[in-house]
């Protein structure tokens, strides 16, 4: 198998994490989410916790440190899927000095769709599975009462993250214009996955 280094980006709530997990299973390579990495560190670092709760970006130095530690692990030898990194052109340039990116996908949804999806996102504290009250995957009625909302899924934090995304991350489309494929994220999960696979 040729090594695949796949970048998936899009606004918050676009489903890039869901699609990265689907791709991970199909291609048998790991899905690396910077959001997950940050949340692990935030458990022991109050400054990072406050930055993520308010919707801000974590410093490039920390992002690079966490990311390069992760992609150096043995399960990444055949490739990996990056979700949430790079977020800026500067991060993209740094990444290109280290690895050869093979595929880039932008999952596109409107800002209002993003807000609707995220304010209705919930997680199950029992098994950490993610559900949504507005879109898929919906929770079974018997578990709704125990579901919780992440602190950074409040509307003010979401709109701040979208502001940053619109200012910085969308420029990635121009940076990767030779290989970036835009996918309509306002389709069903299966249809989005099908559209991505057509380009791999």
Image (tube, rainbow, N blue to C red):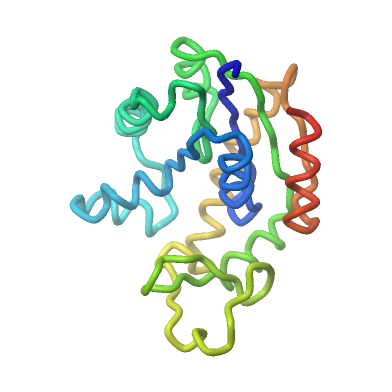
Residue drawn at point x = 73 percent, y = 20 percent = 179
**Residue at image point 62% right, 47% down:** 22
Q: Would you say 57 lies left or right of 46 here?
A: right
Residue at image location 29% in from the left, 50% down from the top:
40
Side (left or right) of 138 relative to 54: right
Extreme-left residue of the structure: 44
In this rendering, position of residue 56 left or right of residue 19: left
* Total marks in image: 0
Q: Residue at x 64, y 29 (%)?
A: 171
| Front residue of 168 and 86 | 86
Residue 97 location (% of width, % of height): 46, 10
* Image x and y of residue 17, in percent: 56, 49
Please state the horizontal and vertical placement of residue 113, each as a whole percent of the image.
71, 62
Whether residue 87 can be seen here: no
> Would you say residue 15 is visible in this rendering?
yes
Q: Residue furthest top?
A: 97
Q: Quadrant of residue 187?
A: bottom right
Q: Is residue 56 above or below residue 78?
A: below
Quadrant where the C terminus sits is top right
Residue 70 position by quadrant: top left
The N terminus lies in quadrant: top right
């Amino acid at each position: 198998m040729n090594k695949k280094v796949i970048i998936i980006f899009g606004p918050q709530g676009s489903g890039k994490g869901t699609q990265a997990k689907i791709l991970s299973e199909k291609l048998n390579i790991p899905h690396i989410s910077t959001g997950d990495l940050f949340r692990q560190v935030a458990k022991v670092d109050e400054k990072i916790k406050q930055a993520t709760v308010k919707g801000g970006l974590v410093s490039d130095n920390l992002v690079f440190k966490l990311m390069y530690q992760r992609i150096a692990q043995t399960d990444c030898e055949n490739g990996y899927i990056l979700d949430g990194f790079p977020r800026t052109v500067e991060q993209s340039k740094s990444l290109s000095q280290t690895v050869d990116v093979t595929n880039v996908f932008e999952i596109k949804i409107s800002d209002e769709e993003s807000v609707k999806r995220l304010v209705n996102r919930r997680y199950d504290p029992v098994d950490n599975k993610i559900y949504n009250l507005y879109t898929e995957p919906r929770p079974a009625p018997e578990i709704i009462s125990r579901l919780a909302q992440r602190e950074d899924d409040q509307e003010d934090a979401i709109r701040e993250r979208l502001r940053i995304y619109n200012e910085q991350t969308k420029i990635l489309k121009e940076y990767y214009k030779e290989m970036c494929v835009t996918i309509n994220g306002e389709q069903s999960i299966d249809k989005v996955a099908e559209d991505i696979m057509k380009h791999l």
